[in-house]
Image: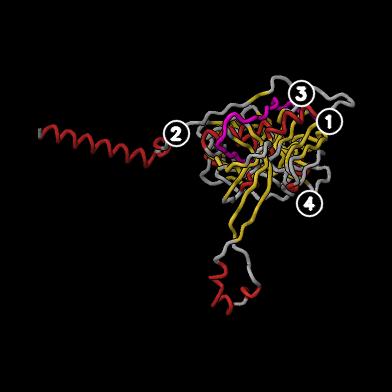
Amino acid sequence: MRKLWLLFAQSTTVALAVLFIVALFKPDLLRRQAVPPNLTIQQAHAPAAGVMPGESFAPAAQKVIPTVVNVFTQQKVRGQGHPALQDPIFRYFFGDRLDARPRQASNLGSGVIVSPNGFILTNQHVVDAADEIQVALADGKILPARVVGADPETDLAVLKIDAVNLPAITFAQPDSLKVGDWVLAVGNPFGVGQTVTAGIVSALGRTHLGINTFENFIQTDAAINPGNSGGALVDATGNLVGVNSAIYSRTGGSQGIGFAIPVSIARQVMEQIIKSGSVTRGWVGIEVQDLTPELAESFGLKATEGALIAGVLKGGPADNAGIRPGDILLAVNDGRVLDSASLLNLIAALKPGETAKLTVARKQQTLALTVNVGRRPMQRTVPDAAAP
């Protein structure tokens, strides 16, 4: 009996030691793996057909309207209160008690039902810091919602409501949209109620707007106003092509320049959030800037394609791979680097823990360097353009 007890004690000690080592050096192995909820996405099997002159958008609108929801949020905030509270003596005697009463700040936006079991895609800025979220369905039913996860760098968030057999939107095929295609914007502008507006795709791949970290916007002249954020941008047959996100405006209202996050980015971010609650991106530890014609000429380059590496984090993946400030990054694996924005997207698409080949130009020579990809730290962004 004593030998059995001694064997048990020794086995327990060894197991605890192994557990301690794993927890110290490989904590990821002990993290509970999230079981992805059941997510059913409807995918369009063919590109949208064009609209003939005089043809109505009613069939597309009727298809989309039940899938777009209104999102209402409440946030408890402490305001300035009475002006007398700014007086130091008054605050000394009464300030704490009068400041203790929080005010309610409300926000209004839109969202898109992406799965019959209650997943809703919207903008992150619509639900940011919200203490209470309610979703109004097209049939008038109002349900509480919770945030599954959010990604500030693309301004996307996923909500969940307790409901089943909901009408879900159909996703368009990635990259099926063309400049000049008809699109509809569906949402709740200014809180007047669900509204459908029509326009065309004015441009694709808009970057350097200072709205999000990762930008590849669809630009449209379909009327988008405050309250449309998170609503659907759909093609002429009602398939989701983007999530309305921002407007360029001097007055706060639509001036014919609206921006939507493409469905390819929205779906990728949404699926990661539903699976793990967050978005994982690649990172190599470099600072870059665009190549101007003057810089390209000074480096002896014939074109301005590529990105100038302005800084390298000491001890980071790029530093360990031998990349230096002043190198011109030309390609990431097989993807060409057009500018700093395209480079950011190429690096972010890499999987942490894997290796990648970075092609750089250095002193009239082209080098291929192998880098071990790290995980991008979360960075919060502040939009410059108006967020509807």
Q: Where residue 19 sits: x, y (%)? A: 32, 38
Q: Which residue is mark 2?
A: 33
Pinpoint residue 138: horizontal percent, then vertical percent: 68, 37
Residue underneath mark 1: 180
Whether residue 309 is visible, yes or no, is: no
Q: CA distance from mark 1 to mark 2?
A: 44 Å
Is there CB contact under 8 Å for labels 1 and 4? no
Q: Which quadrant is the N terminus positioned in?
A: top left
Q: Is residue 174 magenta?
A: yes
Q: Amino acid at mark 3?
A: Ala
Image: magenta residue range: 154-178
Q: What numbered label is drawn on residue 47?
A: none
Left or right of 57? Residue 102 is: left
When asked about the image quadrant of residue 69, the answer is top right
Of residue 373 and residue 78, the one placed in the foreground of this image is 78
Give coordinates of residue 50: x percent, y percent: 82, 23
Classify 10 Å Cα crowding around label 2: few (below 14), some (14-19), many (20 and above). Answer: few
- Three-letter amino acid code at disc 4? Gly
